[in-house]
Image: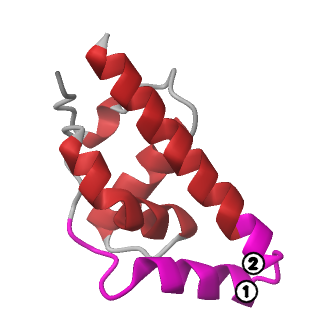
Amino acid sequence: MTYHLPVRDVPTDLPGHELVSDGLADLAAGRETESSLLVAMAAPRLRTLGFDVPDGGDGQPSHRLYELLAERGLGAHSAYNALVGRMVSFARAAEHASSG
């Protein structure tokens, strides 16, 4: 079973749901944000789960996310790894929820 959810229905009980909700909305609006780049990176996996991920994050969203974090002086390496970890947690939880 997979989810077939519009942007507004990202399950709020999943870890990292706010990143996914914000990222989906930002991608749809054409905004380049940490969340939109993270969702663009995870788009294949999210689409496999049934999420409607808009096109966007052209090029290499993983590189652009790292650059954006570095520009903000947020300790890019640790911030990048933390964001990717939250996305992985979301995807695993969504996979688990859809199989149960």
Describe residue 96's horizontal placement relative to residue 45 as left or right: right
SS category of the residue bearing label 2: helix
* Left or right: residue 75 compared with residue 61: right
The magenta span reads 55-79
Mark 1 and mark 2 residues within 8 Å of each other at the beta carbon: yes
The residue under the point 32% across, 88% down is 59
Query: Which residue is rendered at x = 78% and y = 67% of the image?
Result: 78
Q: CA distance from mark 1 to mark 2?
A: 5 Å
Task: Name the N-terminal-most of marks 1 and 2.
Answer: 1
Pointer 2 residue: 76
Which labelled disc corresponds to residue 70?
Answer: 1
Identified at 56% across, 68% down, the residue is 34
For the stretch drawn in magenta, the main secondary structure is helix
- In this view of the protein, which residue sits in the foreground, 46 or 72? 46
- Residue under the image location 16 percent in, 31 percent down: 4
Q: Which mark is residue 43?
A: none
Amino acid of disc 2: Ala
Residue 14 screen position, x and y as percent: 51, 27
